[in-house]
């Protein structure tokens, strides 16, 4: 799909990629639960396993953010091509397309924010230290993804 975007064509596997990212997220959450069970059982390598799962989670968050930015910017590049001189589309149609794509992008961002806010609101803090540490790690991963996303937004603004 990246090659398609670079060639000015729309991506074809967006739904599959989003499904796979969601499935990966679910599997990592399951791993966090498994690691918590190991911690509760005082497994000698539980902390090491937790760090590995946490790094996996951070990688997934970074991958999801990068995916969103690349595909959204790819859509924006296509819109820029519509507005290019010599194009058959009128500026008002291109402007409407830009507004529609921009609105969709903003809606996707808001959905992402709302989804993560729901996750934070629904998250329960454990009653023992290992559970709280696991949940704190997940929260820090989300916080880092938000910070990374903010930096990318600031870079995009600076490049405008």
Image (tube, rainbow, N blue to C red):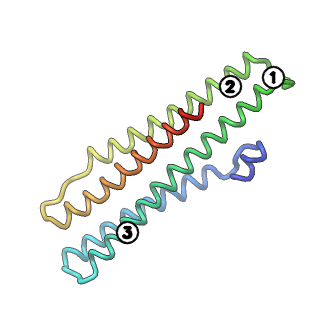
Q: How far apart are labels 2 and 3 at the CA level?
A: 41 Å
> Relative to 45, is 64 on the left or the right?
right
Q: How far apart are labels 3 and 1 at the CA level?
A: 49 Å
Percent across and percent down for residue 127 are: 12, 60
Mark 2, Cα crowd under 10 Å, few <14 / some 14-19 / many 20+, is some
Q: Quadrant of the C terminus?
A: top right
Residue 41: image tag:
none
Residue tagged by mark 3? Answer: 53
Which of pointers 1 and 2 lies earlier in the amino acid sequence? 1
Q: Secondary structure at mark 2?
A: helix
Residue at horizontal 29 percent and vertical 59 percent from the top: 137
Residue tagged by mark 2? Answer: 97
CB atoms of marks 1 and 2 within 8 Å: yes
Q: Nearer the viewer, residue 39 or 77?
A: 77
Q: Nearer the viewer, residue 150 or 35?
A: 150
Extreme front residue here? 158
CB atoms of marks 3 and 1 within 8 Å: no
Residue tagged by mark 1? Answer: 89
Percent across and percent down for residue 92 are: 72, 16
């Amino acid at each position: 799909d990246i090659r398609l975007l670079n060639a000015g064509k729309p991506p074809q596997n967006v739904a599959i990629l989003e499904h796979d990212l969601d499935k990966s997220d679910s599997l990592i959450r399951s791993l966090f639960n498994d690691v918590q069970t190991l911690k509760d059982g005082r497994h000698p390598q539980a902390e090491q396993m937790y760090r590995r799962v946490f790094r996996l989670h951070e990688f997934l968050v970074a991958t999801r953010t990068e995916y969103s930015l690349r595909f959204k910017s790819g859509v924006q590049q296509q819109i820029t091509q519509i507005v290019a001189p010599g194009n058959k589309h009128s500026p008002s149609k291109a402007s409407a397309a830009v507004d529609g794509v921009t609105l969709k992008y903003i809606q996707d961002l808001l959905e992402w924010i709302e989804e993560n806010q729901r996750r934070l609101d629904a998250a329960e803090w454990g009653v023992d230290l290992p559970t709280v540490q696991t949940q704190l790690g997940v929260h820090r991963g989300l916080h880092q993804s938000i910070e990374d996303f903010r930096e990318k937004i600031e870079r995009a603004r600076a490049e405008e």
